[in-house]
Image: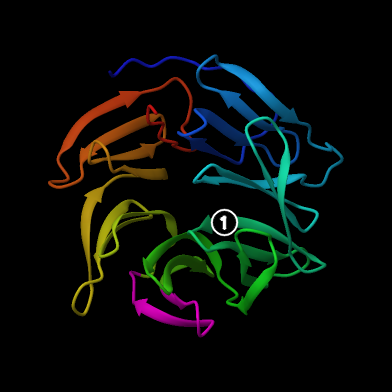
Amino acid sequence: SNAISSVMALAGDFSNAAVSSADQCLYTTGIYTGNFNCISLNTNAINFSFSSFNNGFPTYERVYSNNQKNFIAEYDNVIHGYDKYGNDNYTAATLSGTYPYNMFSDRQYLYAEQRDIAGSGVALNVYYLPNGAAFRNLTINQDIVSMYSFSADSLLLFTNSNGVGHALFYNIPNNQINTAITLPAEKIFSAVQISPIEYLIAMQNQVYVYTTSSLGMVSPLLSIPAVAAMKFDTITNQIFIASNKNLNIYNASTFVLKNTLSFADTLKDIAILHSR
């Protein structure tokens, strides 16, 4: 269906959103004034809402959900995990003077970007998924846009440094970063994994396709301005790209545009919900 319907309006600012298809819930978070919310998509009612401090400093940073584990990165150097009822079931801490930002998890670990409160330092933290205990810490000093599993023991990171995007391999056992490929000298706004060997990277007014097989190759794909977010749906084999007030839907095999949906407001994020 191409119908657009509103779930609800939320007060305050907005950082990002995540969906748990298993829980049939939407998680949203603000930063300074917006709350951390869990919304039941079966009833369009709020399961729980944790208020921001609204004291001039950030309260929350980012929300992330994977495999019925829902994480909120908080400015006071902690990551909490919650179930859909608001029960706290996970805690992981960043170093004093830092805060967590973007997150990613696999079956073993939670990976979190750690940013300095004063200064531009950035590190990658790795926590054990069952208990939140710290496993690895590596200074990278590049802002992480997104992270994906590349192999059983490595991640592919998309980062920005001084307005220039980078693709980096992170070797988990060796706690080591290596350049995957040199990208065009532009800022990355969004990146999405189609498969471990194929990625889309939105930079400036161009979306590139990055193929990691053989020596790797980056090629221009689509001319789209102001990309705010991209998501790949494995079930329908479609790519969703948010640009200004439009949601463009592409076939992931051919990259042919299938549909464009127009909204009244500027799109900030995309979250895909599957029926259980």
The vertical placement of 93 against 236, above or below, is below
Name the residue at the front extreme. 130
Is residue 45 shown in magenta? Answer: no
Name the residue at the right extreme. 55
In the displayed structure image, the side of residue 23 where residue 218 appears, left or right = left
The span shown in magenta is 168-184
Residue toward you, 215 or 148:
148
Q: Where is residue 205 in the image (x, y as percent from the top left)?
A: 33, 51
Residue toward you, 215 or 261:
215
The answer to whether residue 138 of the structure is visible from this angle is yes
Q: Position of residue 77 (x, y in %)?
A: 77, 59
From the image, tell me which residue sits under label 1: 103
Amino acid carrying mark 1 in the image: Met
For the N terminus, give its image quadrant: top left
Residue at image coords 40%, 22%: 263
Residue at image coords 63%, 56%: 101
Is residue 175 shown in magenta? Answer: yes
Instruction: Check the image and tell me how it is coloured.
Output: rainbow
Q: Where is residue 248 in the image (x, y as percent from the top left)?
A: 29, 34
Residue toward you, 136 or 23:
23
Residue at image coords 64%, 76%: 137
Q: Position of residue 105 (x, y in %)?
A: 52, 57
Residue at image coords 74%, 70%: 119
